[in-house]
Image (cartoon, rainbow, N blue to C red):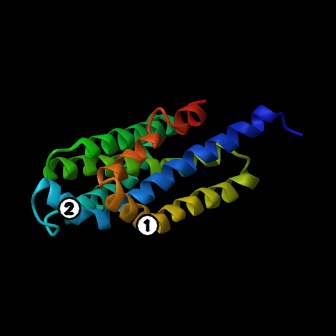
Amino acid sequence: MPAPSSIAYPRGTLTAISTALFCVQIDYFAMNLALPRIAAELGGDAADLQWVISVYMLVLGAFMVPAGRIGDVFGRKRALLTGIALFGIASAMCALATSAEAVIAFRAVQGLGAALIFPVSVSVLTNALPAARAGHAIGQAYGIAGLGNAAGPLVGGLLTETVGWRWIFWLKPSCGPSGPARRWVSR
């Protein structure tokens, strides 16, 4: 039977990666319901603020393949932690933004962080676990990310209607460099 610490590391890695993927997914799906409030508070109209959503997905899609290569060249753990840090810091900056343009710019940075998280997380899990368990762990991580898809509209709507749209962004810095990823992925 493996020692407890050897079991904790893969479980911790799976937890950290699942949390990061969940945050990336909930981020995209929570924003749709917040756009009218963001437009009202920061100026502009909801149609112009569609870029809050679009720029995130454009940058994520454009940089996913290069981000995987960055992980190969500079190290997967380093790339993953960089992505998590970028995502968390950009989330905090979106929450503090005073203009629609700033929110859009920081959403682009979030997309870059998400692009580093997605492809590199699979390789980190593959390397952290025995081959027989890696596929199951990847399925679990992406299943938890899928919960972010489902929870996004509910969470986004509730936060926007109660404490304000900025709290959609304040939830995600916990995925950042001081969150669970730092402890488990950086080993």
Residue that carries the numbered disc 1 in the rendered image: 154
State the image quarter where residue 93 is shown.
Answer: top left
Q: Amino acid at mark 2?
A: Trp
Residue that carries the numbered disc 2 in the rendered image: 51
Q: Which one is in front, 16 or 79?
A: 16
Question: Is residue 29 visible to us here?
Answer: no
Question: In this rendering, would 143 be left or right of 148?
Answer: right
Question: Is residue 80 visible to us here?
Answer: yes
Residue at x 33%, y 52% (from the top left corner): 111
Q: Are marks 1 and 2 in contact (CB under 8 Å)?
A: no
Task: Kindly state the secondary structure of the residue where label 1 is placed.
Answer: helix
Task: Kindly state the secondary structure of the residue where label 2 is placed.
Answer: helix
Q: Is residue 52 above or below residue 95?
A: below
Residue at x 21%, y 50% (from the top left corner): 103
Q: Is residue 52 above or below residue 66?
A: below
Residue placed furthest toward the front: 162
Q: Amino acid at mark 1?
A: Leu
Cα separation, mark 1 vs mark 2, equals 21 Å
Q: Which one is in front, 109 or 127?
A: 109
Mark 1 crowdedness (10 Å alpha carbons): few <14, some 14-19, many ≥20? some
Q: Nearer the viewer, mark 1 or mark 2?
A: 1
Query: Counting residues from the N terminus, which is met first, the one under dot 1 or under dot 2?
Result: 2
Q: Which one is in front, 119 or 94?
A: 94
Q: How many marks?
A: 2
Placement of the N terminus among the 4 image quadrants: top right
Placement of the C terminus among the 4 image quadrants: top right
Question: In this rendering, would 101 be left or right of 149?
Answer: left
Q: Position of residue 45 (x, y in %)?
A: 12, 66
